[in-house]
Structures are given as structure tokens and as C-alpha cells.
Image (tube, rainbow, N blue to C red):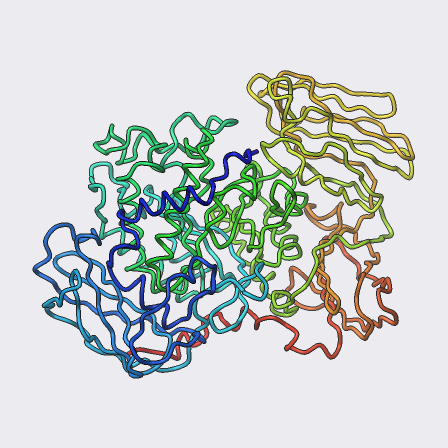
Amino acid sequence: MMKKTDTLPLLTFLVVTLSLVGCGGAQQDYGGFSRSINGDIGSGYNNSIANNYGGNREGGTTAVSRGSYAKIEGSFQLKDVKGDPFDFEQNAVVVTLKKSDGGKVDIPAFYDGNNNWKVRYTPMGTGKISVEKVKHNNEIAHEERLEPKDWTVSGEPEAGFVRIDKGDKSRFIFDNGSRYYPLGHNVAWKSNNQPDVPEILKKMGSSGENWARIWMNHWDGKNLDWSADKAKKIAPGQIDLDTAKKWDSIVEAAGKSSIYFQLTLQHHGQFSSQKGYKYSNNNNANWEDNPWNVKNGGFLQNPEDFFTDIKARKLTKRKLYYIMARWGYSPNILAWELFNEVEGTDAGSGKQWQDIAMWHREMSLFLRQFDGYHHLITTSARPGVPADSPIWETVDYTQTHIYPSDILSSLLTQPTTEIGKKLEKPHFIGEFGESNLSDTEGHVLHKGLWASIMNSPTGSAMYWDWDAVEKGNRYGEFQQVRNFLDASSLPNQGDLVSAQLPMESSQKADLRFAPGEGWTTAKQNEFVVSSSGVVSGIQSFPSFLQGAAHREMTPKPLTLQVSYASAGKVEVKIGQVSAVGGTVVVKCAGKETTKEFTKDTTAEEKALTLDVPAGAQTITIENPGKDWVVIRQIVLVNYAPALADYARIGKEYAAAWLYHRGNLDSKGEVASTTGRINLMGLKKGKYKATWWDVTGGKSIDNADLTVDKEKEALWLSTPPIARDVALYVVREGRTDSKKKGKNSENARGAGRDKQGAK
């Protein structure tokens, strides 16, 4: 947990920022990013920092965009460029475009090799656009072979760029007002024997997905300044143009497939050594191969220096400028992701959070200065980095990565500050998967998708293992969720509360759950397990049950207050075990069972079982051993109703995912059961309830409901449920005017084939 003293004072930030602008900051004029494009699209979508950089359009009108049109692109040659063409401080090349309404916009050009320069621009309106002039370091340039010199933009606009909804800061919206609700999975790099990224993006778009996350990593040739070929040296500050062309194809593929992706600019391995995480021997360390390492002819003595070294920060900005000039035109770049799991760097392991936070502030400010399209900015971290960490302060939305023992328990977690206050920013799970990445049957994928759309107003949880999706051909999982989102209009509903609604069923089943946090200190150790199967707060308890080595992190036993209708059992299943081993003791009603574990304990031996008498009882689970063990699952045998749910409900709308606790992960044919769900809090009126087949992608039953009194407890009977179904309930007479934003599907490829620039 970060101490309050680790938070950077605002005054310190301001003083240091002013001293940094000479490294590519606001005091010099390098081109149109900082000045003109936002005159087209309007400012202030994302946050107050962006509002500080207004447009300088000459003539025309300044209006908020209602969408965007296909990019226009021109090329020319400059033969008198001296010095480094990739250094925007030495060579700022800017193209002034004139529009039919008289307005002008300056667009930075980018170097593409052999004296060739290109410019790319996304128009926000129709009409003729022509090149008025090309400038080199604010002087008129004498370009050659300028092609083309003008374009005519026509047709219907696309949805535009993704913004934060100013009316609901937990959600996204497009320029044209339609809703963007992210649904997708990671496709960070090309894996062996798997399709390349553009091909996977095509499959994703065809399956109803609209989100992806792609890394600028070196091992598959996607890092602009770090080659996968060790024999190929790229000098610091230079750009590998073959890699840039690969990114051209990725960005184009995303546009054709209506995928909006996070471009992950840095990853933790680049600046981590074998020091590793505090609790792991494997942190994907790549520092030994990093070209900026002095051992490889670079200039950084240690990986931690990346965040503070003046040259490193300057060269990082140079790369960011090139990225914005070449691909900033694309609405399909959802966000610039500054880092993947920055806590995994050596600086993160060393708790150098002030340095990391300052780097995030500096790079965020630079992006906001020079990105005239105002793409969103984010970064990522796994659980353990608190929501009030200063690294989150200058990003537009937050995301966490989870690989829990029990995905359903973990998805109940929402980011809060140390004092429990929720962040006023969108948040979703940027990575999730099986704790050991062995989701062979796709059960974790299925549960994670359906539970998360019923838990997050921002977007679905994003599956990490794209290899598993490809090998198992699990794209249909996303299509089924998309079908439900479109039919139910769930993404468009505002003012909904996430809840586990009361359920009754004709059968009981085992209640399975697990702590939802990772390597963190327990803030609460006692939890009530209701007879309905809700274990409120268990998602915040660490899955690492500490022994003597870190007793301060779990100083008290995990305590469960239970109430069995008849005598039963509790089973505790253990996952990972530390190198020196640990011991688990389970106690209840004066009885106990104990087992010692080592890292070599087999999976079959990692379980403890204890009888539990009927009635109210206290179960404790503790580790008096040497070091940690991971609690993989706790099972209360035959304890709760067989049916459970995750839901989002408001005054005139409700949606839910209902599942059979005992059958959800079963193979083959299973027996179904029925029950009732309590739709609490609906307003007086008539409603239509639609039951949905989550595998067939269609409605299976309908019911007319009436709420006669305000806050009446409305019980709705379920159809037979073998594994899981979904439900949505809509009040009759509810109009679209009460919904914020249009269906996100309206934005998918809108006008993609109907517009053009000639």
C-alpha cells in the first residue's frame, strides 16, 4: 500500500514541469498538433488539461464534430533537410491545409525514408481540402512531387473519436453522440503459429468485438526503436521504418474491422531486470537486451533510470511525436497506453512511485499538447497499486489486470481510494484470465464476459489469452455477448446499480468462492456468508495467506460467519505455495484440520476438509507456517441456492445473468432447475421481461410484469436453467430520450464504405 507521503505535491509538479518544457514542451512551436486540429473537433472532451490547448483556426466556424471522415494522405519530398529527420526539434515539417469553408489547419508531417515525407489528416466535415503550403521549421519549404494537392471529402460521417461522456464520467461516447461500450480481448503480439495481428482483428470485428490492446514490443517486430534482430542496431532516437509500415497495416486493419484499440507504448519487461517482482522470480525481464542499456551501447546504467534520465525522456517524447504524426489521425486508436503493468519495472519494485508518477505526468502533458485529436490516455497496473496512486492522476481512464483463483469473486471489486472514495473516471478490467493460464474449456472466458457486463458501466472485462481464443475458436463467446448487448440495449442505460439480486431455487448447490485480491495487506478479515450465497467483501481479501515471513499482511485468520440449514462441510483448496512452504489450519466448532504444504505438493493433495455443524458457525482459516500459500477456492458444500446472479438494475430497467452454481463448469448433459429472482426497486408500471439464451444468441421466453406499488418486491420465475441464461426487463413506454447515447453498434463501421476523399 502506498503511503500518503508518496503522493507528489501539485506545487512540486508545476515547478518541475516548467523546467522540463525545453525537452520538447510548450515553449517551442514544432507544428500543428498543439494548435489547430482541435479547432475542428472541439476541445474539452476528456479533461481540464486538454482544455488548456485551444485551436487557432483562421476563418470558418468552430463547432463540435458530429463524426469523422476517412483519412486523407499526401506525400512530397524535401531534399534540403539537414540533421536528424526524426527529431521534431531539429526538423519540424508542417503542412497547412485549406478547407472549403475558408478554415485552415496545420498538420505535422512525418519522415518516411529517402527524402520522402507524408501527411495524414482525418477531416471532420465534407468539402474540398487543398494544400496551401509546406513549412520546414516555420519557413516556407520548397517541396517536390507533392501528390495529391487537393481532395474532396464526401459521404456520411463515421462515429469519430472515443471520448469520456461528460454526462456520465464512468462511460465512453463517440464524437457523434453514440455510445461506445468496449467488448473484446487482448491481441498484444503475434504468437508462434498463430495469425498475425491484422488477421485476428478481422476475426474480432466479424464476431462483434470492438476493442483490442496491442503492444509495441520487440519480439515480433513491433517496437519502433528496438529490433527483434539482434544484429540490427537502431540508434537511440531513430525509427525503424519497416516496423512503422507494419503498424500502418495494423491501424488500417483496426479501421476496417471497427476495432478501437489501446496502443501500449511501453511494457514492464523493457525496464525490469532479474530483480523481479517482490513475490515472483519471473517478471519477463528484457533489460539485458534493451538497446538503451549501456552494456549494449546505450546510455542508461540501470533500468530505473528510464523514468528520470533527461535523454531518455527526451527520446521518448521524440518517439511519441512521430507516433502521433503517423497514426494520430486514426479514430480507431482508442487510447495511448503509457505503460503495461508499470509496477513490474525495477522502479516499481523499488517503490520509486514519485519518479514513475512524474514520468506519467510529463508524458501525459506532452501528449495533450501535441495530439490535436485528443486521444484518450491510460496506463495499466495489476491489483496492489492503489486507486489514489499518483500514476492515475493524469490519465483519462483506469484499468487493472487480474488473474484470480475465482473470477466471479474478483469481478465484484471496484477501484477505490484509500479512504474508500470511488474514482470519477471510467474503469474496466484490461486483462483477465485463469490464474495459471490454463482455461482449456473456456469457462473463465465465459464467466468473465457475462459477469463483467453486469458489473461495469464502462465496458466488459478483457480476456488476455488470445492464443486460447484462436486455438479454441472461441470468437463465438464474444458474438453471443454482442447479440445480447444489442438486443437488450444495456450499454445505453444510465443510472444502473450493480448488484447480486436475491434468488430462490428449488435446489441447493455448493457455494464456491475465493479471495479476490493478490499480494496486498488485508484490511478486513471477517466476512458473513449469507444463506443466499453472497460473501460480501471477500473480493478485497488477499488470496496470499501469509505465514511468519509476512505476518503483518494477514495478521488475523480469515474468518467466515456461516449458517448451515443442516450439517455440512467446508473445503479449502490451495494453489501456489512459496518456496519455503506454509501451513494451513481450518477450525470450526472446536474441531480443526491441519496440513503442511511445500512448493512440490501435488494438486490432488492441496485440499483440506472439515465437518461443519448445522446452525450459525464460525470458520477460521490461518497459516501458522513459514511463508505464504494461495487460497485457490473455498467450498461450502450444499450451502446456497443452486441459482445465482449478477445484475444491473435501475428504476425502469434491469438486466441479469443467472447461472447454476453446480453446473456452470460441468461437461456434458446436466439437470436443470428453476427458481425466482427478486427485481427490487422498479418504478410502478408495466414491464416486458425477456429471457435470453446465452449460447444460442436469441430470446427464449417473454413475460409481462406489473409493478403496482413503488419499491414493491417483484419476484420473477425463471425458465429451467441448466447452466446459465440472461434476462432484461424494460418498462413499457420508456423512450429513447431517456437513454444516454445510441447503441454502440450504430457506430460500428458507420459510413465505412459510403464515404471517400478523392
In the rendered structure, the answer to whether residue 447 lies left or right of residue 314 reads right
Near-viewer residue (16 or 57): 16
Residue 513 position, x and y percent, is 71, 39
In percent of width and height, residue 100 lies at 29, 83
Q: Quadrant of residue 34?
A: bottom left
* Residue appearing at x 84%, y 62% in the figure: 717
| Residue 523 shown left or right of residue 569 in the figure | left
Name of the residue lying farthest toward the left = 80
Q: Quadrant of residue 167?
A: bottom right
Asked which quadrant contains residue 403, the reply is: top right
Q: Position of residue 678 (x, y in %)?
A: 82, 59
Residue 190 visible in rendering = no
Q: How many marks?
A: 0
Question: Where is 98 relative to 48, above or below?
Answer: below
356 lies left or right of 298: right
Q: Quadrant of the C terminus?
A: bottom left
User: Looking at this view, is 60 or 194 the one in front?
Assistant: 60
Q: Nearer the viewer, residue 513 or 445?
A: 513
| Residue 18 x %, y % | 33, 47
> Which residue is at 71% across, 62% downward?
655
Would residue 516 be seen by someone viewing this image from the given angle? Answer: yes
Which residue does the image show at 84% across and 72% down from the upper left? 706
**If the image is split into quadrants, where does the N terminus sit?**
top right
